[in-house]
Amino acid sequence: MSTQVHADQFIDAKGQMCPMPILTLKKAWKDVAVGQIVAIAATDQGAKRDIPTWAEVMGATVLEMTEEQGVLTFYLQKVA
Amino acid sequence: MAIATTDKKRVTLTLDMEESIRERVDELTAGRIEQLVRERVDEALKKDPAKRKVAIIASKGTLDMAYPPLILATAAAALDMEVELFFTFYGLNIIKKGEADKLQVAPIANPAMPVPMPNIIGMLPGMTPAATWMMKNLYFGKHHVATIGELLEQCKELGVKLIACQMTMDVLGFKREELLDEVEVAGAATFLAFAREAHTTLFI
């Protein structure tokens, strides 16, 4: 699956297990400007639920999620 | 006769119009009410500090039982929640300097080990280190789960407040300087003062 979404920043959380992907995301998030898009790649299958949940709680928009050979990539936009 | 027909037509039109007006008004009102309610609820929830607080007690000092409080504490911090982690009894071992990655898991009286071991074998010398080695290397390590030390480091970075229980420190002989520098020392009242304002309170 390919995507048309352009990410301003790419976070590689591949190989990280729960709860590390959201910790990595959270730490990177504070430097993300409103409107910017962050792509995060994870191999922890729990991230399939956890990253959208994190986004919902944090008020981020999940623009797209792709899955390729066990790698989940989420495109998140900082709304506020 | 002709007049009557015209009247009838007008009446029908009016009813249709009324119907469509009502439908549109209902639609708009429903949307607006939903929006207003959501705004009010969001506002109220923002004012509810308890929703964003997590109070966790870590009372166990084994490798397996050190994970849940640290995983939940760091995950909560990643969700922008304010977290206090209170270490009491054997949980103090988790925050003892140099001890985090020396925690062990005992196979004795633990029928749920990945490789179950009869108690009579689990009691033999060397079985606890062996089970710990297996747990670390063949299970957690193999799946690249963060170590206890790494999770403590994450707690520090994410601002999770670590509190050591004074009373159990005294009873079990933990000195302040033996514990991690970022740890605060306090009693039950300090934990409860925070926990009473936290919707999420866990005893592990």
Image: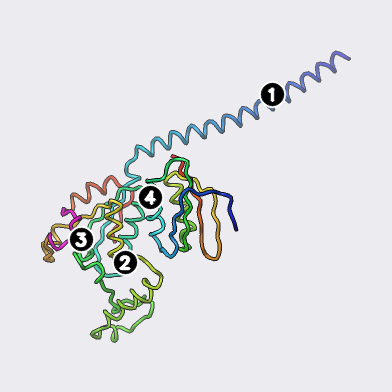
Q: Position of residue B184 (x, y in %)?
A: 18, 53
Give the distance between the C-alpha atoms of the residues marked 4 and 3, in whole angstroms: 25 Å
- Chain name for mark 3: B
Task: Please tell me whether mark 1 or mark 2 is closer to you in this view.
Answer: 2
Residue pointed to by mark 4: B79
Q: Earlier in the sequence, mark 3 or mark 2?
A: 3
Tell me if label 3 and label 2 are in contact, CB under 8 Å. no
Q: Secondary structure at mark 3?
A: loop
Q: Chain of mark 4?
A: B
Pair 4/3: label in front: 4
Badge 1 sits on which subunit? B
Q: Is residue B3 left or right of residue B170?
A: right
Task: Tell me what residue is drawn at x 21 percent, y 68 percent.
Answer: B99
- Residue tagged 2: B147
Of residues B17 and B160, the one drawn nearer to the viewer in this rendering: B160
Q: Are marks 1 and 3 in contact (CB under 8 Å)?
A: no
Q: Give coordinates of residue B27: x percent, y percent.
A: 61, 32
Is residue B90 shown above or below B14? below
Between marks 3 and 2 in the image, the one whose residue lies nearer the viewer: 2
- Local SS, label 1: helix
Cα separation between marks 3 and 2:
20 Å
Q: Earlier in the sequence, mark 1 or mark 2?
A: 1
